[in-house]
Image (spheres, grey):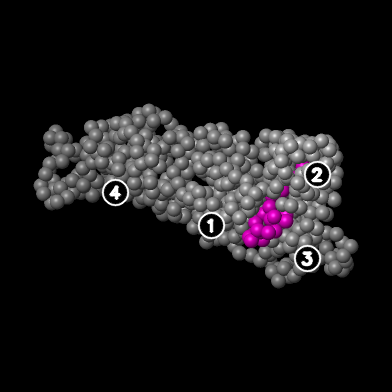
């Protein structure tokens, strides 16, 4: 159809909007993928072809339809086509279709739900595969039936998402008042997030708050790998945007995994932390209820496991919906006619009426953060754990406390027995954490004594231990504050990490530390050796040689704000390369402003 013909059709007036839309509007799907794996989780249904009707955006078309009294008809047409296209996908049973819900349709909510349920039944799609996106575009408080519609949708098994979170009327109120499943952070906060500490702070804290409420977070409008990495490191569960894929009308172009996301998402911790190991050891596997099961079957669950006071509830896609506690149904079980009431088809309540939301966290969440999630809202029975967004098990309060205590014991065991400083496991976990935290500048300092072996051989291990203890005490004196971590790698190798301080401030601390150590360790030598400024000993080849008095050299890798390293091993290898420069320098100190990902940079002596 030519443009002239379409313009002629437009002259029929607003009453023909739906008729015209049927001719030119196409359904487009934009993938929403898991941040860690790049696997497709679902698709947002979007309109394409609106420009052929002379509209600048889908919102302009929708607003015109509303003015003409045809919004409901347009939404039915668009959504029925989207559902039909979704049902034709080979993997639709394991995906979620995200559909926008215009708040102005709240008065027709009952009709909307009934018609959609019919479409789904004919297509064989469970309600839990459909997620309605509630936009902040309109003030939903002005709609008296809004809360009723939200409840009706959720009880019917549909999922709910808050769209455009952060830029509209009442996102926080929606988050507080309604049991939603997803929160979509608006593009405004995602754009340039990798270079904006304020945005990263807001997004990370929004994610933490959502997880406490049992809500998963989707980052909208992710357009670059840098933005994606920042979203992933802030804890976003899912991502959507041009970095993944533009909306497509050719559904054969959709893939199950998006390689660019899998590559960037996979550049995380190459080995599991102590927290992750302990959590996987304590995770509890319990029987689960499906939200479409009958209430009568619930009593059988409690009868088979009388000590269990609650059960997790999942939807058809294995996503947690919350928990069902025994006290929610106890009144019915104790009522003399409770069982008969459940069998009566006139009794309208289903299992979904009794489900309460619970905090949700990923299996790789640090233990202390899990504790914050658990205690963030009083009265929680458990934390529901997921892996790749699907249910993995639960952690009770007792299990979580056991993990925290065991972690403390393991940390104590990891401490160096001579210096009492954290050892290699703690240092490795610290590096993995700081590699992914680009919110502020980080200075990673590696210390190594020069000429320690000749001193240890000449004076004995007792004097050698005194030198190690001396350096540890100086580190404790000079590195103070929550922004500092110090550790003992082993032997005469030490480590310190400093976050948020300027390079010049760190340089000043290090120069002071190295100078004090060189002066005070000199007192461990005999007066004769102090006067000579050297001792005789044997080198590593066994040949007799002279060695200068001991000092400590420091190689410092500076990670600038915004720099995120997916593989902590890159840090270790880069620091190892700086050690030789430090030992060969006059002052024994080298600070490198290198970009680890690029593997190059300037050494600042």
Report whether residue 341 is seen. Answer: no
Circle 1 is placed at which residue position?
279
Q: Which quarter of the rendered picture does the C terminus lie within?
A: top left
Whichever of callouts 2 and 3 sits on the residue coming sooner in the sequence is 2
Q: Distance between the residues labelled 2 and 3?
A: 40 Å
Q: In which quarter of the view is residue 11 placed?
A: top right
Percent of width and height locating residue 300? 75, 70
Q: Residues in magenta?
A: 83-103
408 w.r.t. 438: above or below: below
At horizontal 78% and vertical 43% (from top left) the residue drawn is 20
Badge 4 crowding class, 10 Å Cα cut-off, few under 14, some 14 to 19, many 20 or more, is some
Residue reaching furthest left? 544
Q: Residue 294 carries which label?
A: 3
Q: What element carries label 4?
A: loop
Does dot 1 land on a helix, a strand or a loop? Answer: helix
- Which of 209 and 236 lies nearest the eye of the viewer? 236
- Can see residue 9? yes
Query: Which tag, 2 or 4, sits closer to the chain's start?
Result: 2
- Going from the N terminus, do you reach mark 2 or mark 1 first? 2
Q: Which of marks 2 and 3 is in front?
A: 2
The residue indicated by pointer 4 is 491
**Residue at position x 74%, y 37% from top?**
4
Which x, y percent locates residue 257? 55, 55
Q: How far apart are marks 2 and 1 (CA)?
A: 54 Å
- For the residue pair 527 and 116, the one nearer the viewer reads as 116
Q: Which of marks 1 and 4 is in front?
A: 1
Cα distance, mark 1 to mark 4?
Answer: 32 Å
- Residue count near mark 1 (Cα–Cα under 10 Å), binned few <14, some 14–19, many ≥20: many
Instruction: Give SS at disc 2.
Output: helix
* Left or right, 442 with reference to 53: left
């Amino acid at each position: 159809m030519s443009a002239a013909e379409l313009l002629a059709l437009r002259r029929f007036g607003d009453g023909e909007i739906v008729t015209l839309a049927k001719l030119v509007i196409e359904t487009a799907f934009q993938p929403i993928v898991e941040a860690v794996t790049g696997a497709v989780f679902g698709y947002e249904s979007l309109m394409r072809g609106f420009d052929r009707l002379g509209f600048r955006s889908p919102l302009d078309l929708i607003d015109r339809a509303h003015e003409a009294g045809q919004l409901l008809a347009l939404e039915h047409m668009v959504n029925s086509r989207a559902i039909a296209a979704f049902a034709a996908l080979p993997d639709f049973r394991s995906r979620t279709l995200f559909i926008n819900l215009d708040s102005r349709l709240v008065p027709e909510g009952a009709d909307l739900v009934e018609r959609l349920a019919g479409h789904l039944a004919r297509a064989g799609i469970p309600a839990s595969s459909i997620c309605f996106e509630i936009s902040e575009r309109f003030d939903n408080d002005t709609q008296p039936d809004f809360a009723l519609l939200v409840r009706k949708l959720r009880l019917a098994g549909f999922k709910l998402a808050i769209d455009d979170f952060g830029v509209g009327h009442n996102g926080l109120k929606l988050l507080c008042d309604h049991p939603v499943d997803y929160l979509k952070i608006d593009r405004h906060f995602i754009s340039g997030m990798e270079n904006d500490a304020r945005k990263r702070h807001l997004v990370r804290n929004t994610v933490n708050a959502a997880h406490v409420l049992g809500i998963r977070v989707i980052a909208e409008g992710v357009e670059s790998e840098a933005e994606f990495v920042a979203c992933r490191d802030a804890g976003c569960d899912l991502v959507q945007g041009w970095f993944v894929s533009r909306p497509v009308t050719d559904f054969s172009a959709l893939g199950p995994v998006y390689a660019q996301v899998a590559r960037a998402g996979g550049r995380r911790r190459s080995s599991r932390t102590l927290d992750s190991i302990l959590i996987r050891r304590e995770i509890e596997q319990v029987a689960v209820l499906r939200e479409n099961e009958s209430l009568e079957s619930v009593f059988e669950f409690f009868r088979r496991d009388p000590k269990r006071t609650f059960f997790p509830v999942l939807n058809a896609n294995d996503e947690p919906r919350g928990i069902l506690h025994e006290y929610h149904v106890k009144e019915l079980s104790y009522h003399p006619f409770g069982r008969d009431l459940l069998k009566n088809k006139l009794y309208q309540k289903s299992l979904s009426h009794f489900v309460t939301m619970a905090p949700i966290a990923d299996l790789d969440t640090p233990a202390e953060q899990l504790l914050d999630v658990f205690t963030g809202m009083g009265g929680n029975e458990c934390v529901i754990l997921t892996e790749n967004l699907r249910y993995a098990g639960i952690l009770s309060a007792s299990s979580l406390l056991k993990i925290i205590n065991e972690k403390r014991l393991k940390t104590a065991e990891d401490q160096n027995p001579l210096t009492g400083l954290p050892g290699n496991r703690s240092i490795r976990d610290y590096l993995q954490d700081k590699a992914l935290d680009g919110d502020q500048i980080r200075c990673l300092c590696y210390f190594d004594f020069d000429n320690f072996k000749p001193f240890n051989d000449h004076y004995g291990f007792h004097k050698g231990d005194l030198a190690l203890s001396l350096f540890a005490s100086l580190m404790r004196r000079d590195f103070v504050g929550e922004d500092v971590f110090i550790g003992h790698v082993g032997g005469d190798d030490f480590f310190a990490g400093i976050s948020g301080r300027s390079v010049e401030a760190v340089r000043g601390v290090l120069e002071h530390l190295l100078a004090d150590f060189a002066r005070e360790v000199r007192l461990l030598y005999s007066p004769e050796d102090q006067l000579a400024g050297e001792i005789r000993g044997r080198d590593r080849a066994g040949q007799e040689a002279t060695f200068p008095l001991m000092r400590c050299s420091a190689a410092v890798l500076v990670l600038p704000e915004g720099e995120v390293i997916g593989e902590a091993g890159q840090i270790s290898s880069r620091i190892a390369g700086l050690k030789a420069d430090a030992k060969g320098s006059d002052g024994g100190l080298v600070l490198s402003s290198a970009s680890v990902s690029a593997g190059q940079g300037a050494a600042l002596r």
